[in-house]
Image (spheres, grey):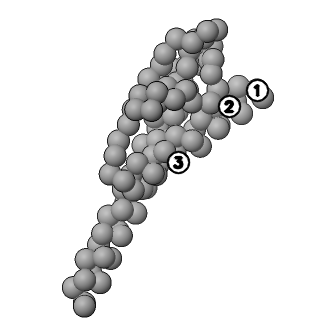
């Protein structure tokens, strides 16, 4: 699979992790770590390597930024859903 396809998979995974963490009220970060043949974007909580590794040096910082951005978008979405569920739960309890 070519590098851009792996990059897309990493961004999709990051957004999904963000949504899940936002729903749970958690937060994680990602970092670059050396891997045989290049660099890898690593989830700093689970120590899991994101898809696309090893990355060439020239693509690694771009990929890290993309993964962080997709995670942040998912995190905000999940957080909004969590707050809306709490709000609706509070309204239902007030009506009862």
The answer to whether one can see residue 88 in this image is yes
Tag on residue 16?
3
Q: Residue at x 64, y 8 (%)?
A: 37
What is the tally of numbered marks visible in this picture?
3
Q: Crowdedness of circle 3 by 10 Å Cα count: few (<14), some, many (20+)?
A: some
Q: In the rendering, at what x and y percent does residue 78 appear?
A: 42, 56
Q: Dot 2, crowdedness within 10 Å: few (<14), some or many (≥20)? A: some
CB under 8 Å between discs 1 and 2: yes
Which SS class for mark 2? helix
Percent x, y of residue 40 = 55, 20
Q: Disc 1 or 3, which lies upstream in sequence?
A: 1
| Circle 1 Cα neighbour tier, 10 Å, few/some/many (<14 / 14–19 / ≥20) | few
* Above-or-below relation of 17 to 78: above
**Viewer-nearest of labels 1 and 3?**
3
- The picture places residue 91, in percent across and down from the top left corner, at 27, 81
Q: Nearer the viewer, residue 17 or 75?
A: 17
Q: CA distance from mark 1 to mark 3?
A: 22 Å
- Looking at the figure, which quarter contains the C terminus? bottom left
Residue hosting label 2: 6
Q: Earlier in the sequence, mark 2 or mark 3?
A: 2
Q: Residue drawn 62% across and 21% down?
A: 53
Q: Quadrant of the N terminus?
A: top right
Report which residue position mark 1 lands on. 2
Alpha carbon distance from label 1 to label 2: 7 Å
Element type where label 3 sits in the image = helix
Q: Residue furthest top?
A: 37
Q: Are marks 2 and 3 in contact (CB under 8 Å)?
A: no
Q: Secondary structure at mark 1?
A: loop
At horizontal 32% and vertical 51% (from top left) the residue drawn is: 25
């Amino acid at each position: 699979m070519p590098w851009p396809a792996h990059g897309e998979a990493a961004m999709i995974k990051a957004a999904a992790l963000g949504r899940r963490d936002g729903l749970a009220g958690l937060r994680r970060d990602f970092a670059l770590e050396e891997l045989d043949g290049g660099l890898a974007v690593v989830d700093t909580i689970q120590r899991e390597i994101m898809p696309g590794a090893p990355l060439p040096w020239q693509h690694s910082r771009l990929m890290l930024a993309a993964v962080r951005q997709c995670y942040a978008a998912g995190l905000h979405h999940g957080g909004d859903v969590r707050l809306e569920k709490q709000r609706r739960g509070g309204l239902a309890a007030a009506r009862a």
